[in-house]
């Protein structure tokens, strides 16, 4: 079994990353998605592409330091992490001009060197971080432990969905925007804006799809 075969067998069609409209502009302009660490040091992108969180727990001294997790890009398989998305909306609730989009990437990026897979949210105490096929398979285990006393079961979730909706793909910085397939938006106004941005930076073949339900994800709370 290979990662490529696992992707095919489970019907995994896309890897997602939500960002603000300014975030997408920065990504398109630089032709890369950058990690939070890289974003903080890039003068152009730090102005254009504001991060989706005010701070990251990975930066705290007590956080696991096996890798520099701030230098990885947080992605999800098939559906977004709605808990994180809703938190991002709360953090920026006072920014009336900020709205969101979801970038959809070719799942072939899961085969790239240095990718880690987490069974649940990377900040949870019982998270398991593993590279390669074993890590990807672990995201789909029948039962996942988030922290002691909090377990989540598959509950007959579709094959393309991870057991815990907060499971993450940690992609080593940077991610090439050439793997971008489409962008999801919530209405026609946003679609027109994103389409213009993509065309400006030469991403003419990237589709813009109006799909407000995509922003609800598929939570598994049982």
Image (cartoon, helix red, strand yellow):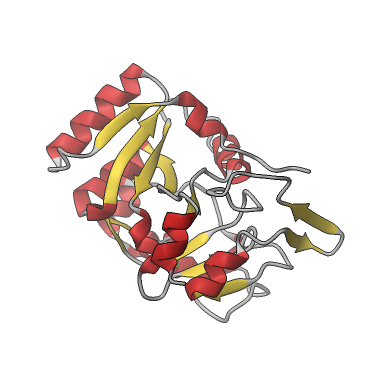
Which residue is located at x 76 percent, y 62 percent?
145
Position above or below: 76 against 186: below
- Does residue 5 appear left or right of residue 206 in this picture? right
- Does residue 104 appear left or right of residue 199 in this picture? right
Q: Where residue 25 sits: x, y (%)?
A: 27, 42
Q: Which residue is more in the foreground, 102 or 86?
A: 102
Q: Which residue is more in the foreground, 81 or 112?
A: 112
- Does residue 62 appear left or right of residue 216 in this picture? right
| Residue at the extreme top of the image, as rendered | 188
Res 73 seen here: no
Q: Where residue 95 sits: x, y (%)?
A: 48, 30
Which residue is located at x 67 percent, y 62 percent?
141
Res 183 seen here: yes
Which residue is located at x 68 percent, y 67 percent?
127
Q: Which residue is more in the foreground, 204 or 18?
A: 204
Q: Where residue 45 sits: x, y (%)?
A: 30, 53
| Residue at the extreme bottom of the image, as rendered | 66
Q: How many marks?
A: 0
Q: Which residue is more in the foreground, 204 or 13?
A: 13
Q: Quadrant of residue 211?
A: top left
Q: Quadrant of residue 193?
A: top left
Q: Where residue 108 sits: x, y (%)?
A: 34, 60
Q: Quadrant of the C terminus?
A: top right
| Residue at the extreme right of the image, as rendered | 149
């Amino acid at each position: 079994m290979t990662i490529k075969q696992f992707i095919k067998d489970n019907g995994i069609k896309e890897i997602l990353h939500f960002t603000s409209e300014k975030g997408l502009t920065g990504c398109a302009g630089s032709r890369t998605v950058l990690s939070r660490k890289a974003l903080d040091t890039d003068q152009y992108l730090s102005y254009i592409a504001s991060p989706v969180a005010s701070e990251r727990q990975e930066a705290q001294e007590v956080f696991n330091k096996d890798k520099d997790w701030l230098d990885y890009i947080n992605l999800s398989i098939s559906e977004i992490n709605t808990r994180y998305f809703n938190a991002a909306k709360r953090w920026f609730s006072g920014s009336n001009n900020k709205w969101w989009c979801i970038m959809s990437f070719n799942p072939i990026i899961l085969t790239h060197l240095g990718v880690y897979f987490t069974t649940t949210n990377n900040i949870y105490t019982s998270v398991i971080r593993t590279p390669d096929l074993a890590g990807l398979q672990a995201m789909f285990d029948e039962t996942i432990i988030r922290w002691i006393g909090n377990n989540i079961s598959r509950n007959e979730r579709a094959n393309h969905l991870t057991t815990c909706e907060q499971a993450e793909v940690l992609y080593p910085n940077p991610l090439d925007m050439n793997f971008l397939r489409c962008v999801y938006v919530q209405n026609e106004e946003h679609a027109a804006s994103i389409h213009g941005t993509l065309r400006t930076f030469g991403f003419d073949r990237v589709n813009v799809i109006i799909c407000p339900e995509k922003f609800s994800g598929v939570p598994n709370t049982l």
